[in-house]
Image (cartoon, rainbow, N blue to C red):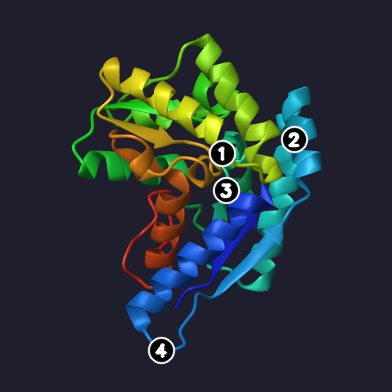
Amino acid sequence: MKTIGLIGGMSWESTVTYYQIVNRLVQERLGGFHSAKCILHSVDFHEIEACQRAGDWERSGELLAEAARGLERAGADCVLICTNTMHKVADAVQAATSLPLLHIAELTADELEAAGVSTVGLLGTRYTMEQDFYTRKLVERGITVLIPEEDGRAFVNRVIFDELCLGTVSESSRRAFAAIIGGLTARGAQGVILGCTEIGLLVRPGDTSARLFDTTEIHARRAALYALGEAVPRDGGE
């Protein structure tokens, strides 16, 4: 079994979900007392979020690159950035080590293609929805990406940072997210990407009739399969 290197803590609320998913899948596949081999570098999200607000992506890239180098020294066989937004600096992280980086947007595009989805809605932080570092990966694969209108984007971003990253799950926010998802579906989305690793803490499949693609679940599951030799990352590697 390969060892999974996790760069987490952004926020730690969703990093918990990563740990649960990779271990549950390994146990399901191998049975008995088996669990995943993984190494976690959990950053202080305060530092990363401050860099985001200041637009200092170079500094945040340096922080995550150093985390990746530490994971490689500790024996990891691959690296995951356990957040969608910080894939803004994925190239810097990839360049810092010889390890394959399992890119969350690439793996999500794989899932969309397998599901026959060519037009998809995207929910995430403002950075993920409005900048092209994430959507570009989907568009390059022939997938049309829809995002909420301005007020919807502002609401989604606020809930992520002011509620979900702080462990608050609100029923009113759940209903509002369901309405935003409905709006994307009405505009032609065949499915909706939960493109922030915390959104799955709030929105469940039963909350909407739309087909949901939870990036936390996709990323963690594909990492576990890679560790078991059942999948190969798109961005290099064995």
Q: Amino acid at mark 2?
A: Glu
The image position of residue 172, as x and y in percent, is 54, 30
Residue tagged 2: 49
Q: Secondary structure at mark 3?
A: helix
Cα gap from disc 2 to disc 3, whole angstroms: 21 Å
Answer with mark 2 or mark 1, whichever residue precedes in sequence. 2
Circle on res. 87? 1
Find residue 94 and name its label: 3
Q: Is residue 171 left or right of residue 139?
A: right
Q: CA distance from mark 1 to mark 4?
A: 35 Å
Which of pointers 2 and 3 lies earlier in the amino acid sequence? 2
Asked if residue 41 is positioned above or below residue 198 in the image, the reply reads: below
Q: Residues within 10 Å of mark 2 (few under 14, many from 20)?
A: some
* Residue where numbered disc 4 is placed: 32
Q: Residues within 10 Å of mark 3 (few under 14, many from 20)?
A: many
Marks 2 and 4 in Cβ contact (< 8 Å) = no
Q: CA distance from mark 1 to mark 3?
A: 10 Å
Give the spatial CA distance, label 3 vs label 4. 35 Å
Quadrant showing the C terminus? bottom left
Point out the residue furthest to the front here.
171
